[in-house]
Each structure stands twice: as C-alpha cells, then as structure tokens.
Amino acid sequence: MTDQIAFPDVVQLAVPLFIAAILAELAWIVLRKRGGRYETRDALTSLIMGAGNVASGILLGFIAYGFFMLLWQITPLDLGTSLPVILLCFVLDDLRYYWVHRFGHRIRWVWASHVNHHSSQHYNLTTALRQTWTGTFTFMMLVRAPLILAGFHPALVLFCGGLNLIYQFWIHTEAIGRLPRWVESVMNTPSHHRVHHGRNARYLDANYAGVFIVWDKLFGTFVPEQQSEKVDYGLVRNLGTFNPLRVAFHEWVGIFRDVTQPGITWRDRWMYMVAPPGWSHDGSRADTARIKADHLARHPEDRGTPGFS
Amino acid sequence: MPLPVLLALVVLGIGGIAVALHLLGLSAPRRLDEAGARAAWLREFPGDTVTAATVCADGSAALIAAHSGPGVVWTMGADTTARPLQGARTAAHETGLTLHLPDFTAPRLQLRLTPQEADLWTRTLKDTA
C-alpha cells in the first residue's frame, strides 16, 4: 500500500489567482456599472473569514488527515493515481460534496459551521472566500471515509476536494449571466449558485452542487434562477455585525444557548443540535418548510412554480 | 507554498483590496428614507405590517412600529438589517443613544439622534419593557 503520495495544496497555490480575479471583477463592476456590488466592510469581513479558514486548515487539518491515514491503513484497497482514477475520484468527491453541503443546510450542527458562508448580503468573488473556521468540529470528514476505504489515497481525495473548492470560486459572481445551455444543464454555474445564496422563500435549500449540477437534478433539489424574481442574498435573519468572530461563531453560540435553556426535554436539546435550522421546541421559529408555507399563504399564485413544487 | 510567502500574499491581498474599495468610494453607508425603512423591515419580517417608520435625522436607522411590536432597522454598509426591540436597553451618549440588543449577531447599535429623537426612542423602549 502506498503511503507517500504528494499532491500540491492547490487552494494555497490559487491565492494569487483569487486576488487577481477579485480585482478584475471589481474593475469590471466599477467600469461597466453593472454585474454586482462591492462594499468595503462586507468584503473585508469575507476576506478575513477566508484567511481564517486557511489558518484553521493549517492548525486543525492534521485531525482530518490523521483520520484519513488511519482509514488508509485499514483498507486493503489501493486504486493508485492513474488519470482515470483521479477523474473518478473528482466526480465521486463532488458527490460527497453535494451531501456534505446538503447536510450543512439541513442539520443545524453542520449549519453552525457553514452559515458564515451565507452571511454576506453581497454576492461577489469575495463571498466565495467567506469560509468556515469550524469545519473540523462538524465531523463531516466522516463522509469522505467511503472514498478512502474504496482505495482512493487521502492525498488524492484532498487534492480533488481542493480542485472542487477552486471551481466554486468563480461561480460567486453576478458579472456572468447565463452560460450556454449544455453548460447550465451539467455544470454548477453562477446562475445556479446565485439561487443557492438566495434568502427568498423560493430559493431556500436549493442547488447544493459543487461542480456538477446534475446531483441536484438527481436528488430533487434543483431550482433554476427565475428572471421574474431577483435573488436577495444573505440569511433569512441577516446579521447585524461585521465582526469576524461573531460571524464565525454566532450559530454555535445560538446552539449552546438553546441546548442549555431550562425547562425543555432531552429530546428538545438534541433536536436543537440536529434538526434543520429554524426548528424550535415551541414552534416559535420558522424552518424552510414553514417559510415556504407562509410565503404561499401570502402568494398562492406561486404554488407549483419552481421552488414551491 | 512557503508559509511566509502565503502570509505576505494574504495580508497584502486583503489590505490592497480593502484600500482599493475605500478609494473607489465603496465604504459610503446607505441612507434610509421612510419607504426604505419600511421595506427593510418587511424584508426581514415579510408577514408583518408596518404602521409607522421614524427615520433618524442622519438616515442610519429607523424606529419601526409594526403589528408584531416595535423594532429597529439600520444600515449595514450598503445594506440593512432589522430586529425587534423586545429586551433592548439604551444608554445615552453625547450624540444620541447606544442600543443594546439581546442578540449575539447584533449586540450593540450606536444611534446618532437629535434630543427629540432620543426621547422618542427612550419612551418607546420604556413602553416595550
């Protein structure tokens, strides 16, 4: 079994590309006066969140990598690193990403980590870098276990994950409208991912794809961007702070406060951790299903249209 | 990539982009008018009904009267957010009030208010308590 395989850390190598692309998008928006919006404090918060994400990877990455290497010692399978294996790993890791991302929106414990990526009311290339500092604590590394047990080397799996993240960078833009039909039908695109960042009732919990939008079509979570309804970016309840520490940890604090409140059952405490965001023991909050139902009560004409079917 | 190089790239990249945005005038805060304040409240609480919106003289925030109770909307850079005022406290400062909200995601809000506006906010919060 091969233990020593080296792949480049593509996310770190892409940092100069990220900076150049942000400056190019900014220049495009300023010169053309269309294609998105930038605001200093919002962008600064996003960039600091991105830097914190890289730092947390450097500090805590050994936990996931140690877990993966443990699995690699256990598995009798080794698929090697030929080009077809790399391509297969990339596709399967994208399927892995779809489910981790879906869990990230449907399980509050995982949402507590992912929520900060959605906390900007802007949608530009800096938003792509507004990434979690607390991903290690979601235990979503477990979802990668089948890939490693199937014989994909941990370094290869992490390499494919890095490529997946880099792909997702460029789709965080309003500067690109719709791409050719065949691209939109197979790939995740700026249009599809704008929907994912929407706080409109129509667009909630849709388009979880990383690279291939086909996963959403396969698993019933695809909603196309509607010309008739502009995407409103941000959270259902938008943050009132640009403080990166509050952005990074606010949902964890919320979970702690909910779980430790007096007068609720142990089941309630568990549900505050694992139920979809918006769940509450007394029904005082609204989850996605209720937000959509409330919207339809106000706008019955939307029933049966994309996002409400 | 060597760590010192990565660190320099990140620091210079973040700093450079922030300076560029500021020099391009993209730090200017949004200013609310009454219609904007009403819309900002309904954007956060779409099922609610706004009965009155009193915008501060500097346009940075507004006191909302809604069927669900009193609330505040304020500008967040180029955008807005809103919170109900239940459980909020105020403290006077030289140019207005500091609003303390029982919310980790919006803990404190500095309101620049005229004495008349400060009085209205204070009375509203007393009635809410």
Image: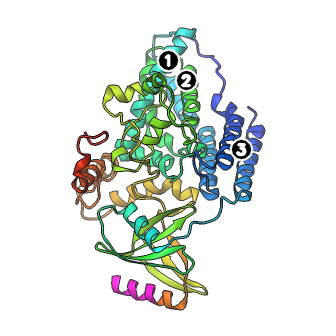
- Residue at the disc numbered 3: B10
Task: Give above or below for A159 relative to A139.
Answer: above
Dot 2 amino acid type? Cys
Task: Give above or below for A242 relative to A117.
Answer: below
Q: Is residue A44 left or right of residue A134?
A: right
Of callouts 2 and 1, which one flags the residue occurring earlier in the amino acid sequence?
1
Dot 3 amino acid type? Val
State which chain disc 1 sits on: A
Q: Is residue B119 left or right of residue A173?
A: left
Residue B46, horizontal then vertical, whole percent: 33, 61
- Residue at the disc numbered 2: A160
The quarter of the displayed image where residue A281 is located: bottom left
Task: Give above or below for B5 relative to A249.
Answer: above
Q: Nearer the viewer, residue A279 or B118?
A: B118
Q: Look at the numbered disc 3 and give the secondary structure of its residue.
A: helix
State which chain disc 3 sits on: B
* Numbered label attached to residue A89: 1
Q: Look at the numbered disc 1 and give the secondary structure of its residue.
A: helix
